Image: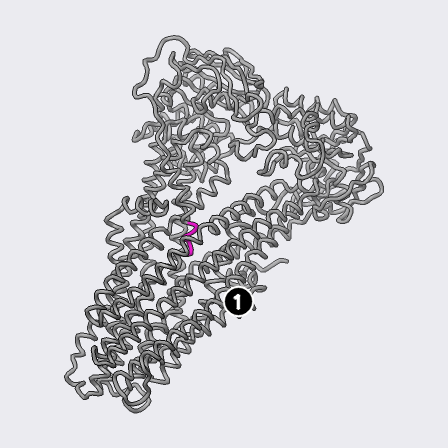
Amino acid sequence: MNPLWRLALRLTRAEPRAFGRGLALSALVLVMGAALLGLSGWFVTAAAAAGIAGIGVGFDFFRPSAGVRFLALGRSAARYGERLLTHDATLRALAALRGALLGGIARLPHEAQARLRGARALNRLTADVDALDGLMLRLVLPALAALGTHLAAFVALWLLVAPGVAGAVLAIYALGGGAVLWATARAAHPPAEAAETALQSLRAQSLDLLRTRADLTLAGALLAARDRAMGQAETDRAARATLDRIDRAGASASALTTSLAAAAALGVGGQLAMAGTISPARAAIGFFTALALGETLGLLRRGLAELGRMQAASARVLALADTPAVPEPATAPMPLPGPLLQVSRLTYHRAGAECAVFGPLDLTLNRGETVLLSGPSGAGKSTALACIAGLLPPSTGQIAMQGHPLGDWPEADLRAALTLVPQRPALIGGTVAQNLALALPEGAALDPDAAWAVLRAVDLEDAIRARGGLQMALGEGGSGLSGGQSKRLALARAMLRRPAVLILDEPTEGLDPATAAATLAGIRAALSDSGLLIVSHRAADLPFAHRHLALEHGT
Amino acid sequence: MTRPRTETPAARLAQLAAPAAPALRRASALSVLAALIWPVQAALVAAALGGLVTSSGLSLPPLWAALGFVALAGLRAGLDGVAQAAAQRTARDLVAATRARLLTAACLQRVGGGALSPAELAALVAEKAATLGPWASRYAPAMARTRWVPLVFLALAATQSWAAAVILLIAGPLIPLFMALVGMAAETASRQQMAEIGALNRLAIDRIAAITDLRLLGAGARARADLARASDDLRTRTMAVLRIAFLSSTVLELFSALGVALVAVFVGFSLLGEIGFGTWGGQMTPVQGIFLLMIAPEFFQPLRDLAAAWHDRAAALAVASELTEAEAAMARSGTILGTGAPGLPLPAAPLSWQGLRIAPGPGAPARAFPDGHVAPGEAVALTGPSGVGKTTLLAALAGLIRADAGQIRWGDTVLDDTSAKAIRAGLAWVPQSPRFPDAPLAEAITLGQPGDLGAALAAARAQAIVATLPDGLQTRLGDLGGGVSGGEARRLALARAYLVRPHLVLADEPTADLDAVTAQAVTEGLLALRAQGAALLIATHDPALIAALDRDIPLSAEDMA
């Protein structure tokens, strides 16, 4: 099925009643608009006929004029209610979709997640999620409301005017409106995708250009790089020109459809009136109703303009949200005595690469022990840790935790026993307390004493107290703390889990020697029974370790 | 190009769009013209329906009226299409011109102390500049229609019935005031709505960016629950704002519906003879009545279009302010020498500088630098405490910063805008934190310069880095997630330096923050460059590296006041 429809169904299922009520009100607004103009046309024409016939005194003007006023007021009220309902439902449904997206991304393999974390992929994802804001509000609901309104109008015109008029109006709107929707859906996807890609490339290339402009200037390549970025702007312009053309064609076709339908109602109804089959006032109903139904197409215009972008975005968002679950063992194995962690002959080879990133690596980690792993920059230390933490499948070798291969551990039990703090750990926007609470089981509340204890262990207590304590707010990605402070907050967060195995990737990078020493000592003291595996290239960290391993480049 | 701070966002937007203004005026005029066809269509329909009611007076067979109606609709759609095409083309040109101007100014800014971060500038160039498009293509024509169409329709209505005109005037009217009220409320609403929905999306993206950490903490479910709770809070707040904001558009809706209803009731009663006033003498005819009824809804249409496009205006106003400020800040910051075009290197010669005074950042007071020189083939260390200006001096020698006073010479050639590209062609640059564009690694290293990349990688001790990458030299570093480490990046930058066989290498702290093994590899790479014949000028604190060089140019804060 078309991803756009699948997504629309998914959003609708999240809030079926609210969307249903919103849709009913949307249709009511349109119906009342058509009824207002149709009734007005009937009233004016009938009044004219009565006035000329000299029977104006007996004409019941009370009910039609009251009807006109009721429709005018009722339409505004219905519009207000419709907007509130549909916006509320959309916000709820999009919240559910974002949750599903996060869940789907959480099930991706580590490498795919790492790619998604890049600025370019995140921007793309942001643009995709943004693009879907309007799917229900500007496309699906207006289209369904239009459909309902036309069917209601068909019945009304059949009964009040003539079957011929009703048929002509419905047929013209169905053909015209259907053609506009069909043609836009067919034509807009590729240029919308091209425009979005060009926009993202323009941003990425501008960023590259400005970040590397010193190097580009020295290489005499600044102008060429600028022209390449401008080339993306040109691609964007060309794709938008196509989108603009599709938009104009849709607008013209919509306007002509309305005019044709109104003219058909006038022509057919007028002929019937001249033949005396229906009264002129009834012919007027047909014309004015057909004219007012043009609003059904007008409301769709913005949605149509975004249709191509939504098509492209929905496919990607759905693919991510529907990431299949990873099979895992049902029960945790019984921990065996002996080393906490036993790594033997471990290597990792990137697909297609000439050499292994590191290894082979042999390593044993016991309770209460600190092992330091060092090696030159680029020797694959972080990759080795990702393997040991079960993020990357090793190319060769075995990793056993508490006597059992990593694969025998269900994810939740593995994470409870083993925690890795990456070299560049990520924090989230929110308070310090919220960031720390991520380490706790779902639903558990953060104990302030425990929180302060871990912050003290990483020498962060004073800095956090000075800036509002645990309620100190951090910006997106945890901005607001210095690099060293963010890192220590991530260390404190990991300590709250009290894991049997704690793996730290360059925990002292960017810290001054006194803070580095205090932090390592604090962690060791607080987790006296855990095994610590620390990657560091600083000689000052050596005295903390019981053992020291050097990692070599792979061959 | 300094502008007073008191300028309104609207004035800034007008200034930005000034080159597009004539084209937009023409498009808007066509758009108004298209809207003005409606009264003719209305007259045809009125004549036909009126003719059905009474044979006296103006009358037209319905079929002819229908044909005329469609033909005029075709003309109207055609004119409108041309108007839109012109407005959309102008909008695209405006966006493209703004982007080109921004990019050019941003690339030529002096290096060090840029006015805006690269990420901010990239966002301005890409999606923010794009918001000028909908403003020009949708809002500007809608504004023109709102100025003229209701006025003309009001005048037309008045020719038939002053009372109907008064109804329109009361219901729609005091147009500027009404528009301002609705506009302000609609602006607040759309801004709030966009901001809050944007905040919701950022909440989700923030967690996606942290996905590995969430997994390592077993916090996936907790993060989803947090996100749901935060989304719900934001939704409640958003809806509170929208409940008020939607009132404004409801008011617009109400006034236009009431306008139509009141005109219909007035016309009906007039035709019945219940109302005897409102026309210019005599009873209202059916044709007049139907004409008035058809004019009424279209009288309000431009206002509704304008309200729908109001968000485009709000977005463009916000961006116009940012753009103007960015351009002014870049104009203040100063530029590099030359344009960054490729050049042919001059023969090897000593690089020397005399009497230099350089500002370390835009607006900072200039500092005096001691004179110095580097002879061909010589290896010189540039030493001194952090912050003394070593990086600033290197950037000035490469023509990336303009000196306020003094002279830099390559042999007898003075470094200026004309000679910059030739002098730079003989230089190589190894910055402290090398950055690579998101391109295949081979291209990211060479930046399009010819040379033997394999030999360069070998000399820079960088083959091992390439060997572990999934696609070797075709790997995009951006796809690796983490990219390369600091030490690897410096070795790749050395390979770039080696590639171009420079006369002189300018390197900034090449061994800072590296482990001993990697620092040794970088030092060997630098010495390999020297063995190739290049002179070296290296800003460094590293005693091992200083010892490996011929001599030392010390910078000290006391000498430079």
Read off the residue under disc 1: B24
Q: Amino acid at mark 1?
A: Leu
Q: As drawn, is A536 to the left or to the right of A456?
A: right
Q: Position of residue A277 (x, y in %)?
A: 20, 78
Nearer to the camera, A150 or B443: A150
Looking at the magenta stretch, what is its main secondary structure?
A: helix
| Residue B255 seen by the camera | no
Which chain does tag 1 point to? Answer: B
Q: As drawn, is B554 to the left or to the right of B519?
A: right
| Residue B500 seen by the camera | yes
Nearer to the camera, B411 or B290: B290
Q: As drawn, is B444 to the left or to the right of A486?
A: right
Which residue of the protein is positioned furthest toward the top in this rendering? A338
Looking at the figure, which quarter contains the N terminus of chain B?
A: bottom right
In this view, B162 is above or below B466: below
In this view, B236 is above or below B270: above
In this view, A73 is above or below A466: below
Nearer to the camera, A465 or A214: A214
SS type, badge 1: helix
Q: Dot 1, crowdedness within 10 Å: few (<14), some or many (≥20)? A: many
Q: Quadrant of residue B210?
A: top left
- Who's the residue at 82% across and 32% down the image? B376
Question: Would residue B547 be counted in the magenta stretch?
Answer: no
Q: Position of residue A388 (x, y in %)?
A: 45, 19
In this view, B53 is above or below A427: below
Region rendered in magenta: A304-309
Question: Would residue A307 be counted in the magenta stretch?
Answer: yes
